[in-house]
Amino acid sequence: MRVRQFCSALILAVVVQNVAIAPQTFSSELKEEVIEKKAYTLAELRNLIHDGEMAFRTGEYQEAIAICTKALAGFETHNHFEGMGTAHNCIGISHHSLGEFTKAVRQYEQAAVVTQPLDNPRQQAAIANNLGEAYRQLGEIENAITYYEQALSMMQSSQDLQVQPILINNLGFAHMELENYALAQDYYLQSLEISSAENYQYEMSYALKNLGEVAFRQGENQKAIAYFEESLQITREIDNRRVTALNLNSLGKAYETTGQSDQALTYYQEALGITTAMGDRHSTGRVLKNLGSFFQTQGDTELAIIFLKETINTYESIRGEIQGLETSLQESYLSSVESTYRDLADLLLTQNRILEAQRVLDLLKVQELSDYLYHVRGTEETEKGTGYRPPEETFLALNQEQTEQLIIASKRLADLEKISPSNLTEIQRQELISLRKQQNAERGKFRAFLESDEVQSVIGELKSNLSTNESLSFNLSQDAKLKEQLQTIKQSGRNAAIIYPLILGDRLEIVVVSADTPPLRHTVPISPAELNETILEARQALTTPPKSYAKSSNSNASLSKLHDWLIKPIESTLETANIETLIYAPDGALRYIPLAALFDADSDQWLIEKYDINNITALSLTDFDEVSALHNFDLLAGAFPSQGATLEFGTRQVPLDGLPYAVREVETLAETVPSSSVRLDEQFNGDIIYEMNSYDVVHLATHAEFVSGRPKDSYIAFGKGEFATLEDVRDWDLSNVALIVLSACETGVGDTLGNGIEVLGLGYQMQQQGADATLATLWSVSDRSTQLLMNRFYENLLDGGRTKTVALQESQRAMLTNDKFNHPYYWASFILIGNGL
């Protein structure tokens, strides 16, 4: 835990340092009177800021925001820049503590702007420190260190001792995040030395807490516990509820590590009560995740699942808040929580709770899209998070009832502890003593609650349901929706199955769901390293066709291996259900390999010879409610010119070769499709995007590249050096478009694999703008073979009655009969993403 941003040394002293009287806490009557006034004196505004700090310290973040917002308006009236900066900082760190990161960063930035002209190093250091905190919490550690060092330099120049321990502490925490433990410990000891000498209790508690973290991370558990307990004693005395909660959480983890499970559980429960009462979602998520991991370790799987579901639903609520942050910050935050989604899916699958696991896998894919594109908000269904079974809802209600009792007592205790002991009435003094006794007595009761007859009855009901296979029919709206969509597809004439692979640390899990059969899972023991090595070999085999080629050649070994891992375990299931269409939601690096190219050595067949294939980003982001084949359609086709061009991305230049076959491809399509409009040469420019929504199908025979981790560098090229990035696609209107075709795009893969989300990110963007489906290529293909395949594809669509996936399947199968183009390099690159049915 790093030092919190908001403290009197960094915030309040800026405004009150020139005031003759010390700030005092308002009575509630006086506060209401001041807030109702249309104009405030500077003295009133300074007291408002002080009250805002008090509200923050006791975890009343919304109250702090309300008070400091009033103060901000007043300082603006007086044109008082120091006060405005302090108020912005106050509001910012309150939003920060509520997990409202976008609002927090904006407030810090405004504080920096209004204070820039001032000669006030303390205030400017406070703002730099808080920006450092925002960057650090979102994983941008190097940027955080830059801000911390900037703030410390300001304070050392002014010889301000009280602020220095805070900034030194924060530097220590940043280096601890980078695992520079020796350096981190040196910083913490420096901070502790200064704060102890000056009796700065806040700063002492932070230094001790962080020394405990360093010790814990290095396996020195008893030393860590001693530091945490010493810090906890201080934070309780000074009523720092947030750091009290984090100390309790850390103590829980340390005691759990040493095998003292009852003590660990006690600390976790008290921490959760405090963070919930404060509305601190970020810290609540940490405690919930620790509780989930704790119960998993203890073998209490049902409880572990409940708490991990709660964790993910907390993450989902935060994810909606960070949409306005700059993209690198969103990416850092999102990647830091993805492992929890995999952990929960893993646990659910081991319990054979397949539909629930599928739900979590869907949320994981939305999370990964958010990580790449940053503005993915999911749907109404995904925003609901994970669902709960009725017994789980019963447990949560029981637990909430117990937690609320603790919260009410905790809030009242916090109110009383704000009052100076000398100002307490006798009734208040007795109430304070009673509440402290109650708080003491409540510790340790969580285990008793978990072992109570009520809770054990709920757990027993969960286990009974699962043992009687009731897991296959529990009533959650999102899972009913899944079955409805599969039935809709079946009624259209195609029998489909959804395949969700999940890459875990020691195995590959494959989830299969179809309209008329129970959901099934299959486990393949394989390490991610071996899987990635095979994927790289398969990718190399697919993208480098030999001069002479036979279907049974050794170059297919890796593709055969992938078939044995992904398809062989579910082959009999697919055959029994008479499956014709595979709806495929690939995970991780599997996205770089088209499912069509998997090779069955036993039958000497490619998978595309057995099934038509539809890729999806996530089921929750794909609408199969309307399933209809294209028949008579209007086509808009454009081609990159025969002459090359250079794209300019700021200082980066991307030279592109001409595509002479692209022009012929488009001209041939115009002859094939009666209702066609063609844009070539000068007409193939950026303005084509404003014509797209007038057509059923848009075909772009042009360069396009989708880069792992860099959507701003991913592009679709037009003529004359014009282009659109993947982010620009957000502004397109494709609401009337049934199909977008990109016949010459490429996904770059180096020696190391990414998670492949850029492959499906393109399809997601097109879907979000209204297009039903996207046909794209995973690697750049010979122009001549593309022309042949595309022409056959459109002929199949025009023939009527075929879905897009079947039209593509038949086109690819036709290429297998062409001796010149039967290698999968020429036909397997084409994948349909979205609703191709």
Image (cartoon, grey):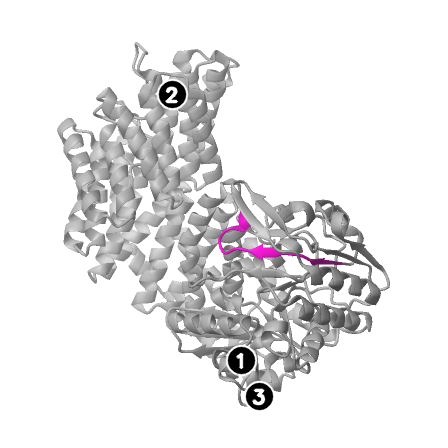
Residue type at tag 1: Ile
Q: Nearer the viewer, residue 395 or 743?
A: 743
- Compared to 178, does 292 lie above or below? below
Residue 68 seen: no
Magenta region, residue range: 698-713
- The kind of secondary structure element at disc 2 is loop
- Compared to 556, does 461 lie above or below? above
Q: Residue at x 39, y 73 (%)?
A: 530
650 inside magenta stretch? no
Q: Residue at x 68, y 80 (%)?
A: 818
Indicate the quadrant containing the N terminus: top left, top right, bottom left or bottom right.
top left
Residue type at tag 3: Asp
- The kind of secondary structure element at disc 1 is loop
In this image, 389 relative to 689: left or right?
left
Q: Quadrant of residue 499?
A: bottom right
Q: Earlier in the sequence, mark 2 or mark 3?
A: 2
Q: Report, in whole angstroms, how far the alpha carbon at label 1 lies from the one at label 3.
A: 14 Å
Is the residue marked by circle 2 packed among few (<14), some (14-19), or many (20+) residues within 10 Å?
few
Q: Earlier in the sequence, mark 1 or mark 2?
A: 2
Q: Residue at x 31, y 22 (%)?
A: 122
712 inside magenta stretch? yes
Q: Nearer the viewer, residue 229 or 503?
A: 503
Residue type at tag 2: Ser
Is the residue marked by circle 1 packed among few (<14), some (14-19), or many (20+) residues within 10 Å?
many
Percent of width and height locating residue 230: 17, 42
Q: Which residue is mark 3?
A: 604
Q: Which mark is residue 567?
A: 1
Is the residue marked by circle 3 packed among few (<14), some (14-19), or many (20+) residues within 10 Å?
few
Q: Earlier in the sequence, mark 1 or mark 3?
A: 1
Q: Which residue is mark 2?
A: 27
In this image, 119 relative to 264: left or right?
right
- The kind of secondary structure element at disc 3 is loop
